[in-house]
Image (spheres, rainbow, N blue to C red):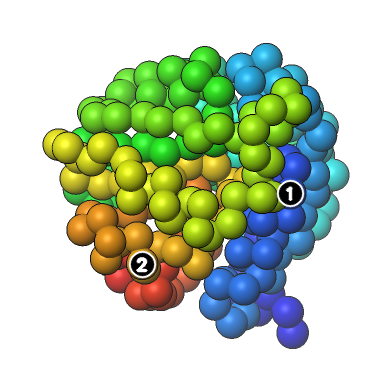
Amino acid sequence: MYGWRAKIGLITPMSENAEHAFHIYAPEGVSVCSLKINFPGPTPEGLIYLTDQLEDTAAMYKGRNLDLVVFGCTSGSCIKGYGWDKECTERIERACGIPGLTTSTAVLEGLRALGTKKVAVLTPYPEATNVAEKKFLEDNGFEVTNIVGMNMSQFTGKGMSFEDADEHFLYQHSLHMDLKGADTFFLSCMGLTTMEIIDALETGLGLPVITSHQATLWSALRHCRIGAKLPKLGRLFTL
C-alpha cells in the first residue's frame, strides 16, 4: 500500500524538481501527489500573483486522504514579510481541511534546529525578491551575513534558466560565496536541483547546509511524525 506511513500533497510552481526530489529521497512508506500553479516569475509581483491562487489550488485537495499539504515555494511563502508563511498555511487549511506547511516555515524550523544565528544565502531571484527574503529571515531572528542572486532571470529572457542550473553550476556558485561570519549556508528555491550536492557542499564549505528541498522534506516528514535520518542529505537530517 502506497503511503502507509504518510501521504503528502504538494503545491508548487514551475518545474518538477520538488516531486523528483520527494519521490527519490522520501523514505519508504511515504507517498507524494502534486498540483501546479502557473505564475510569471519570481519577482515580488509574480509571487503575489502566485499566492493569490493558493487557496483555490489547495481546495482541489479537499476530501483527499492526505496527512499534510505543502506549499513548496520559498519566495512565494515569504514575499509579504513576517508571518506570511503562517498566513499561507492558514489559507491551505481553510481551503482543504488538511494540515498545511510552507517551505519558508520549513526553512525557519531547519535553521532553528541547527542552532543557526547567522546565515549566508544564495538564490536565483532578482534583487527585489532577495531584499524581501533577507528581511523575512531577519524579522524571524536570523542575521543574514550575505545574500547573492545568481544570474538566472529566465522569465526576462536574460540569463540561465532554472532547468539549466545543474549540480556543477550550483556547487561552484556556492563555493564562491562570501561566508564570513555565517554559521549556516542556505541555498534557496524549490526550482533548483539541490539534494544531490548537499553532502559535498557541507564538506566543501565546512558549514551546515540548508536547501529549500531538503528543509521542506525534513519538516514535512516531522510534521507527519516520521523522524527519518538521512545523513547524505546534510546535518539537518542527522538530528
- Which corner quadrant holds the N terminus? bottom right
The CA distance from mark 2 to mark 1 is 24 Å
Q: Residue at x 80, y 49 (%)?
A: 35
Label 2 amino acid? Ala
Label 1 amino acid? Ser
Q: Residue at x 50, y 35 (%)?
A: 150
Q: Viewer-nearest of labels 2 and 1? A: 2
Where residue 39 appears, as percent x and y from the top left, is 78, 29
Where residue 131 appears, as percent x and y from the top left, is 44, 18
Q: Is residue 139 above or below residue 224?
A: above
Q: Judge from the rendering whether residue 221 lies leftward or rightward of residue 180; answer left or right.
A: right
Q: Is residue 32 above or below residue 113?
A: below
Q: Residue at x 68, y 64 (%)?
A: 20
Residue pointed to by mark 2: 200
Count of all numbered marks drawn on residues in the image: 2
Between 129 and 222, the residue placed more toward the observer is 129
Q: Sequence order check: which comes first, mark 2 or mark 1?
A: 1
Q: Residue furthest left?
A: 181
Q: Which element type, helix, strand or loop, lies under badge 1?
A: loop
Residue pointed to by mark 1: 15
Q: Judge from the rendering whether residue 35 lies leftward or rightward of residue 162; answer left or right.
A: right
Q: Which element type, helix, strand or loop, lies under badge 2?
A: helix
- Which corner quadrant holds the C terminus? bottom left
Q: Residue at x 69, y 50 (%)?
A: 163
Q: Is residue 75 above or below residue 22?
A: above
Where residue 41 appears, as percent x and y from the top left, is 71, 27
Between 87 and 209, the residue placed more toward the observer is 209
Q: Judge from the rendering whether residue 143 lies leftward or rightward of residue 30; answer left or right.
A: left
Where residue 221 appears, as percent x and y from the top left, is 50, 63
Image-quadrant location for residue 72 = top right
Is residue 110 among what the camera can see? no
